[in-house]
Amino acid sequence: MTKTQRTATLTLDGKSYEFPVHTPVVGPEAFDIGKLYAEADVFTFDPSFTSTASCESTITYIDGDKGELLYRGYPIDQLAEKSHFLEVCYLLLYGELPTATELEDFENRVTRHTMLHEQMQNFFRGFRRDAHPMATMVGVVGAMSAFYHDSTDIGDPWQREVAAIRMIAKMPTIAAWAFKYSIGQPFIYPRNDLDYATNFLHMCFATPCESYEVDPILARAMDRIMTLHADHEQNASTSTVRLAGSSGANPFACIAAGIACLWGPAHGGANQACLEMLREIGTPDRIPEYIARAKDKDDPFRLMGFGHRVYKNFDPRAKVMKQSADEVLGLLGIENNPTLQVATELERIALEDDYFRDKKLYPNVDFYSGIILDAMGFPTSMFTPIFAVSRTVGWIAQWKEMIADPKQRIGRPRQLYIGAPHRDYVEVENR
C-alpha cells in the first residue's frame, strides 16, 4: 500500500479541492483524483493514459531515465544472468524467489500440465493452413475455457491457481502447434524430461522422422528471451488483460484478449518489424543510405529496433540479449546470412555514431531478439507468438493481483466528448 502524506490543491472557478498524494516505494508520486468527478464535476484528459496510474502493483517497476527494470525488486540483468525462466515465473506469481523445494514443486506442476486436451487438435485443424499463428493462438487460448471449465471460477483461489499453472504450462505447446500447423508438419507432443525452453524448441523443430537434440546455447538464449519479456509493467496488452479481467471474465478469455492486443505491430510486432527492415536494407553496403535517411527530418523512415518509448537510456534487457545474440551467432555463424551481416554491421555503426549516442538511440531488446529468432530458424510470423508465450506469466500475475485488490472495480475510462450537441430527430422527408 502506498503512503499518503501530503495533499494537492486544485482551484477551479474560485473553489479549491484537495486530493491525496500517494508516495510509492520508488518512482514519481501520484495525485489521487478518484473523487475529482464527484466533488468538482470535471474529468482529467490524458490520452493513452501516459500520465495516469491505473492501479497499485507490487510486480514490476521501470525507471526509463535510468534504464532500469525490476521484477519484484530484482534487477532484470541479475535474473537473466543467474536465474531461469520458471524460477522467474515463480517470483512474478508469488512475490519471492523460491526455495529449492518450492522451485522443484513448481517446475513439476508446470511440466505435468504441458499437454493439451486431445480434442484441441481438432480446433487447430479448423483454421486455414495459411492462418497467422497469432490468429490461431487467440482462438485456441480463448477456447481453453471450453476445455478446462473446472478452472474458470475467478472467485475460487484454487481455480485461479490451477488456471495460472495451466496457461504457463500449455502456452508453449499452443504456440509450437500453431507453428507446426502453419508449415504443414505433424504436432510434436511435449516431453517431461526437458526443461521449459528446450521443450518449446523441441516441439517447434523436431519431427517424427529422426531424433532432434536442442543445442544448450539455443535453449539458454530462448530462456533469456522468455525471462526478459516476462513482464513490463502496465503496457498495452497487460492493461488489456486487467481491463478484461475487471469485468469478471474468465482467465482464459482475459489472456486471449492480451494476445490479441500484443499482436499489434506497435507492441509485440516490433522485433518482426526490425527484422523486415534489416531485410529491406539487404546488404551491409546499403547501410549508410539508411543511416542518412534516419537522420533526415523530412524522411519518414526510421530505424526499427533502436530506442524505446519508455527507456530514455539503454534498454537494460538489450545488454543481456546482446550477449545471447553473440553466442547464438557464434554457434550458427552469419557468413551465408546477409540479414545477420546487416544487423551486425548496423549495430556497430549505431553504437559508434555520435548522432545515435547523443539521442540515446541504442539497440533495444527487439533488435537482438529478432536476430536470435531468425538465426534459430523461426519465421517472422512466430516472433509475436513467442513473445506471447513469454509474457503469459506477467499477464497472469497482473490478473491475479487485480482480482485480489479489494479496491478493484470494473474499468470504465471516461471521454472528452467533441461530437454534435443535443439535436432533435428530423423525419426522413424533411432532411
Image (tube, rainbow, N blue to C red):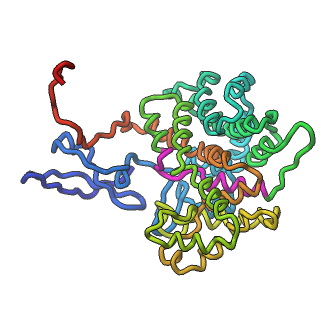
Residue 76 location, quadrant: bottom right
Q: Residue at x 21, y 42 (%)?
A: 37
Q: Which residues are magenta?
A: 218-238
The spot of residue 379 in percent (x, y) is 71, 49
Please tell me in which quadrant of the rendered image residue 337 appears.
bottom right
**Going 47% across and 40% down the picture, which residue do you hit?**
240
Front in this rendered view, residue 85 or 58: 85
Residue drawn at x 12%, y 52% is 12
The outermost residue toward the left is 14
Q: Where residue 405 appears, x then y in whole percent?
A: 42, 39
Q: In this rendering, is residue 22 above or below 67? A: above
**241 over 294 or under it: above or below:** above
The answer, for residue 132, to whether it is visible in the render is yes
Is 397 within the magenta? no
Question: Residue 145's x, y, as percent?
Answer: 59, 25
Give the quarter of the image for residue 181: top right
Is residue 49 or residue 274 the one in the foreground?
A: 274
